[in-house]
Image (cartoon, grey):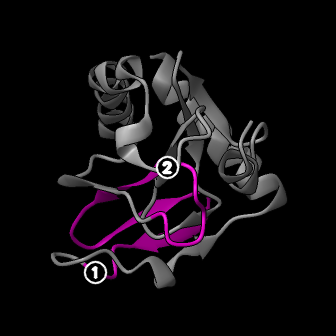
Amino acid sequence: MNPTIEKFGWPRTLLREFEHWLVLARPAQPTLGSLVLASKSDAQAFSELPAGAHAELATVTAAIEGALRKAVGYSKINYLMLMMVDNEVHFHVIPRYEGKREWNGKTFPDAGWPKVPDLGAAVALEDADLDALVAWLKAAFEQ
């Protein structure tokens, strides 16, 4: 796997695998259910991805939106392709909602609502909390 995928905790954070893409739980959660949608390719520009990766995005985004709708009940969803530090093609998928969500004894406010998401206000999950988030989100993908 490419360095970006590894940085976001693969294989521990893996929620769903597709032919060209991986869906990972984001260890730092700016909102509850935040993900990383990472290309399996080593491409460092969106235009460099194979045609199949672009075509598969319709299936992948439908799966993401269905799972997060069940798990989080978002109002909007943001796909952010930042690639400032991590070079391989990936999106930060941020479910957006007014107010906050409670999960596993933790509070996840959407600090940027209704404007740009505040990635710096993320709740960092580690160890058992991260494993519980992965299991919870993985179940949402399987429903």
Give SS at disc 2.
Answer: strand
For the C terminus, the quadrant is: top left
Three-letter code, disc 2? Leu
Give the image location of residue 66, x and y in percent: 31, 28
Graded by Cα atoms within 10 Å as few (under 14), some (14 to 19) or many (20 or more), the crowding at tag 1 reads some
- Residue range of the region highlighted in magenta in the rendering: 83-112
The residue sitting at the right extreme is: 127
Tell which circle, 2 or 1, labels the residue nearer the N-terminal end.
2
The mark found on residue 22 in the picture is: none
> For this view, does 105 lie left or right of residue 127?
left
89 magenta-colored:
yes
83 vs 23: above or below: below
Residue sitting at the far front: 48
User: Badges 2 and 1: C-beta atoms under 8 Å apart?
Assistant: no
Residue 128 in percent (x, y) is at 81, 53
The residue wearing badge 2 is: 35
Q: At 26% from the left edge and 23% from the top edge, which residue is drawn?
A: 58
Residue under label 1:
112
Along the line of sight, the residue nearer the viewer: 29 or 9: 9
Work out whether residue 102 or residue 71 is closer to the camera in this orientation and state it.
71
Residue under the point 17% across and 54% down = 75
Please give the name of the residue rendered at 52% of the width and 76% of the height, measured from the top-left corner: 122
The quadrant in which residue 86 appears is: bottom right
Q: Is residue 122 magenta?
A: no
Q: Picture quarter containing residue 62?
A: top left
| Type of amino acid at the residue the image marks with label 1 | Gly
Could you tell me residue 57's position as x and y percent? Answer: 33, 27
Image: 70 above or below 76: above
Q: Secondary structure at mark 1?
A: loop
Q: Is residue 1 left or right of residue 80?
A: right
Classify 36 as above or below 99: above
